[in-house]
Amino acid sequence: MNMQTLEQIAACVSGYDPNALPVEKAQEFIGRLVPKIGTVESVALRSSLGRVLAHDIVSPIDVPSHDNSAMDGYALRGSELAADGETVLTIAGTGLAGQAFDAAVPPAHCVRIMTGAVMPAGLDTVVPQEFTKTAGDMLRIPAGAVRTGDNRRLAGEDLARGCAALRAGRLLRPADLGLLASLGRAEVPVFRKLRVAFFSTGDELRSIGEPLDAGCVYDSNRYTIWAMLQRLGCEVIDLGVVRDEPAALRAAFSEAAASADAVITSGGVSVGEADHTKQIMAELGEVLFWRIAMRPGRPMAIGRIGEAILFGLPGNPVAVMVTFYAFVRDALRAMSGAAVEPLALLRAACTTPLRKKPGRTEYQRAIVGRSAEGRWQVAITGSQGSGILSSMSAANGMVLLHHEQGDVAVGDEVEVIPFDGLV
Ligand code: AMP
Ligand code: MG
């Protein structure tokens, strides 16, 4: 476990300034802070979807195990194809998928073969049946229909015995499940799921089902945070809304830190906060209060309470989501043992002019789509206030405006973080 103090970590991050921290510096700090949870468990193949592979998987077999046909057609010797002009061969028999055609194939003969059938000994080429003509047991192949080696899959061409088929740290996706199945694996070693406890702070918050008193709002962060954690495959411990009382906050932080690898709170971390959240965080843990050079989402607390990593996110509903995606997502992935890959971003022409001050990173809610000419373009979803959750809901992505970037003119290309990808 990484047990550097927060000051030691800060000393490693060049240009660290807690009062105007660039997003990349905050990400670097968090990357150094979070430990990896190393506990391994074995799960059934289907249950490994979305989990993190704990060990390299070495292929115990060649996949495919034999040379086989990639087409329905006729297997032959490439050396017997006529140099120019038609080739005529005699059909010796049929090879079916999963079976070997055992008999020796005499010269000038071929074997009718199905996709996936083992290549008969000595034959190295398959001509697809649609290129051929037959008359009785005679096969006619027009000139140039195939070359030697065509339509033959080699043993081990997908995975060779002894090769690392998958590396530890891989977040297992559908293709990986299929690949593991092709090796005959029923059980997969994965890191245990990360346990994440979270709660909302703020005396103006009401839970669903309670009357909405004057001046109050329903606690929406509880649901967005829950949903984002579900998508990351975490085990969640939902502690609801915690009242702004030192004893209640102390109890909630203690319970959360004792039962989880990470604790996420929302609200109560901005500079002018009148409530007790920051005070109790500082009392119970080792915590830094940052002002990040970003919009939305400036204030954030980061640190440890006991052995749990604390992410004290801002309260505004959009700021919560943006800081979660900017900082918490990769941090939780890293903690769960995953090799963190950079997000694949889309480049799109902006259809709205954007005001942007250099010196902070901005995430603007946007709708990305194709123009009539088929080019990617992106439009901002109106009001970008950090409390306007409806414009986050209306968006299908966020325009990422980098730290140094200035204003964007109509037609300028910008980077977009799409919300959905293949899953
Ligand atoms: P804070 O960061 O605590 O100053 O909160 C900033 C704004 O976000 C305030 O308007 C809060 O009412 C609002 N807010 C804080 N937490 C939540 C929550 N869990 N659900 C909805 N709004 C919230
Ligand atoms: Mg508050």
Image (cartoon, helix red, strand yellow):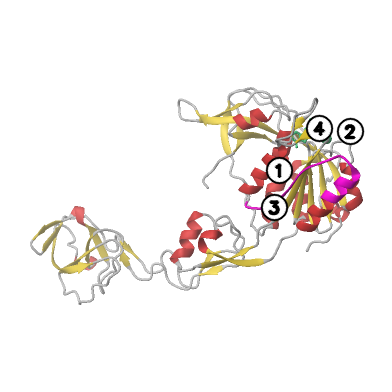
Calculate the distance from the C-alpha at mark 4 to the C-alpha at mark 2.
Answer: 16 Å
* Pointer 4 or 1: first along the chain: 4
Task: Provide the residue span drawn in magenta.
Answer: 233-252
Q: Which residue is mark 2?
A: 272
Residue furthest to the left in view is 136
The quadrant of the picture showing ligand 1 is top right
Residue occupying image coordinates x 64% and y 57%: 338
Is the residue marked by circle 2 packed among few (<14), some (14-19), or many (20+) residues within 10 Å? few
Q: Which residue is mark 3?
A: 332
In the rendered image of this protein, does residue 126 appear above or below residue 299?
below
Q: Hey, what amino acid is under mark 1? A: Phe
* Pointer 4 or 3: first along the chain: 4
* Pointer 2 or 3: first along the chain: 2
Identify which residue, 146 or 180, lies in the foreground: 180
Q: Which mark is residue 324?
A: 1
Residue occupying image coordinates x 54% and y 56%: 49
Q: Are marks 1 and 3 in contact (CB under 8 Å)?
A: no
Displayed quadrant of residue 57? bottom right
Residue 348 vs residue 219: left or right? left
Quarter of the image with the N terminus in it: bottom right
Residue 352 visible in the current orientation: yes
Asked if disc 4 is less than 8 Å from ligand 1, the answer is yes
Residue 360 visible in the current orientation: no
**Tag in front: 4 or 3:** 4
Q: Which mark is residue 204?
A: 4
Calculate the distance from the C-alpha at mark 1 to the C-alpha at mark 2.
Answer: 22 Å
